[in-house]
Image (spheres, rainbow, N blue to C red):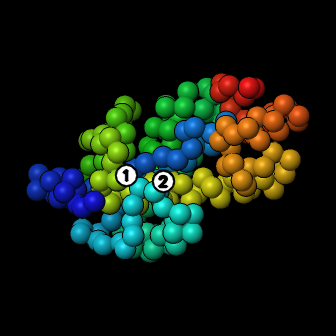
Amino acid sequence: MDFSFENELFEQGYAVVCGTDEAGRGPLAGSVYAAAVILPRDCIIEGLNDSKKLTEKKREKLFDVIREKAVSYGIAEATAKEIDELNILNAALLAMRRAIAMLDPQPDFVLVDGNQTRGFTLPARAIVKGDALSPSIAAASVLAKVSRDRSCLELDRLYPEYGFAKHKGYPTKEHYEAIRLHGITPEHRRSFTLYK
């Protein structure tokens, strides 16, 4: 992973480049989270990687380092209700746009993890597996994932019988069993298959 995507844009004359990524597209419950990060040019963050390749402990540590080193960052969400209204892809893109709107300074180019840039008002480029290629996107992936996991601990406190702290809302056997026994919560995504 290096700054080749970012540096290419700086060479083209863009001054402020951010990376954005989301976490929580697959779970049956809770919000989808997104983050946007502007890193200083050639900023080295030891151990930074795609959040899915890091341990929880490592992500938690990097969460603080990224927030400390970033020029600016934003963390936003789209709720389960918005996911049901818009579909998960559109809700994830909405969360990304909300995170970008929080940045100061505002970027003049956005690197987006995935293959979609629909709805972005700023110039943007989608990079498949961008969270393993671009430090800006990787930093956003860590902030989004840690924020999403922390929200699941809160859900666990509100609905202890569902096991959110353990499965983080993902479609596990235990989660389906809890839904079967207790029904669905207001945090469940009704547009998803909730009964197995």
The disc at residue 131 is: 1
Going by the picture, which residue comes out furthest to the front? Answer: 173
The x and y percentages for residue 148 are: 60, 52
The disc labelled 2 sits on which kind of residue?
Lys
Which residue is at a point 39% across and 61% down the rendered structure image? 49
Which residue is at a point 47% across and 70% down the rendered structure image? 62
Q: Is residue 132 above or below residue 68?
A: above
The disc at residue 52 is: 2
The disc labelled 1 sits on which kind of residue?
Asp
Looking at the rendering, which quadrant does residue 120 occupy? Answer: top left
Q: Quadrant of the N terminus?
A: bottom left
Spatial distance from mark 2 to mark 1, Cα to Cα? 9 Å
- Mark 2 touches mark 1? (CB < 8 Å): yes
Nearest the eye: 164 or 20: 164
In the rendered structure, the answer to whether residue 132 lies left or right of residue 174 reads left
Say which element carries label 2: helix
The crowd level at tag 2 (other Cα within 10 Å; few <14, some 14-19, many 20+) is some
In the rendered structure, the answer to whether residue 29 lies left or right of residue 78 reads right
In the rendered structure, the answer to whether residue 22 lies left or right of residue 154 reads left
Which residue is at a point 69% across and 48% down the rendered structure image? 167
Q: Quadrant of the C terminus?
A: top right
Q: Nearer the viewer, mark 2 or mark 1?
A: 2
